[in-house]
Amino acid sequence: MGLWSGGQAVQAQALLPYNPQLNSEQLEQAGLEMAEEAIQLMRFERPDAALSRAELSTQLAPERFQTWFILGSLYLQSEKVDQGIEALKKAQTLAPEEAVIRFTLGSAYFEKEDYQTAINEINEGLKLKSDVPTAYFDLGNSHLKLGQYGEAINAYKKAVTIEKNFWPAINNIGLVKYEQGDLTGALTEWQAALKIDPEQAEPKLAQAVAIYTQGKKAEGLKLGEAALMIDGRYGDLEFLRKNLWGEKLLANTKNFLETPEMNAVLTRVQTQPTEEQP
């Protein structure tokens, strides 16, 4: 009986799982590593798995701002804006000196169309780190949505001062000037953007519309065709609106795209394999 009991005891012990005793530092490290895994999964277009890892990382390392920041950023990429803001605010509480959290919160509020709060968050971030061109670009976009054209141009110009080849900011100065009725000024900005990168569809199409509106129809149509062959999405007015094209430019673009020549181009673009567009 004694031998039998001992055998049973050994067998039962063999079935017990091994539970290592992890200290808080090890748990935090595991959480940070899991947050990094979440980023990689998002890059491989596995958003559900990425969010699952990121959520678990905040449980393992709840006092590290990085896990909350990554979780918030992934929520935003998954269009879960409210959850993203909640996670980012937690990160901001843990690391109020981190400007990137404020900038990301600004982007989140922009997505919610709360442009004034976006401006406030970005400005708070710029107090901490004032040499970030993308932050000034986002600030300019928020002012643009509120119709604050002077402030928008100032923000875009600061972005270009920091990074002279930052063509999106130059392009958007053109968008503002067009809405202000400065057609010549807008064209100058779009030409400058294309000088930096000649293969950008947005400034090329904007320039095409402006030139066509000036009466240079053949030149405008040729440019418009070149723009849409680069990226056919710019033939969609709603896509242009999301890219901050104003009402004056949209109205002229609508007329431009409805010409028989541009209709033919759009038909051709729509039949292209989708991989030809970035």
Image (cartoon, helix red, strand yellow):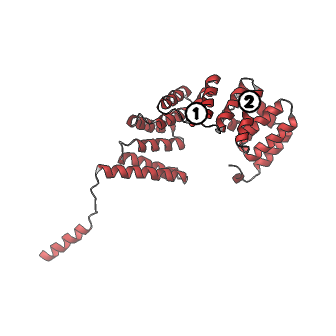
Look at the numbered disc 2 and give the secondary structure of its residue.
Answer: helix
Taking the image as drawn, is residue 254 in sight?
Answer: no
Which residue does the image show at 80% across and 48% down from the upper left?
268
Where residue 270 sits in the image (x, y, percent)? 76, 48
- The amino acid beneath tag 2 is Ala
Q: Is residue 28 shown above or below 160?
A: below
Left or right placement of residue 221 versus residue 66 in this view: right
Q: Nearer the viewer, residue 238 or 58?
A: 58
Can you tell which quarter of the image residue 206 is in? top right
Q: Quadrant of the N terminus?
A: bottom left
Q: Dot 1 surroundings within 10 Å: few (below 14), some, or many (20 or more)?
A: many
Q: Nearer the viewer, residue 163 or 260?
A: 163
Which residue does the image show at 77% across and 33% down from the upper left?
253
Mark 2 → mark 1, Cα distance in angstroms: 20 Å
**Residue holding disc 2:** 186
**Residue holding disc 1:** 138
Look at the numbered disc 1 and give the secondary structure of its residue.
Answer: helix
**Of label 2 and label 1, which has the lower sequence position?**
1
- The amino acid beneath tag 1 is Asp
Q: Is residue 174 shown above or below 232?
A: above
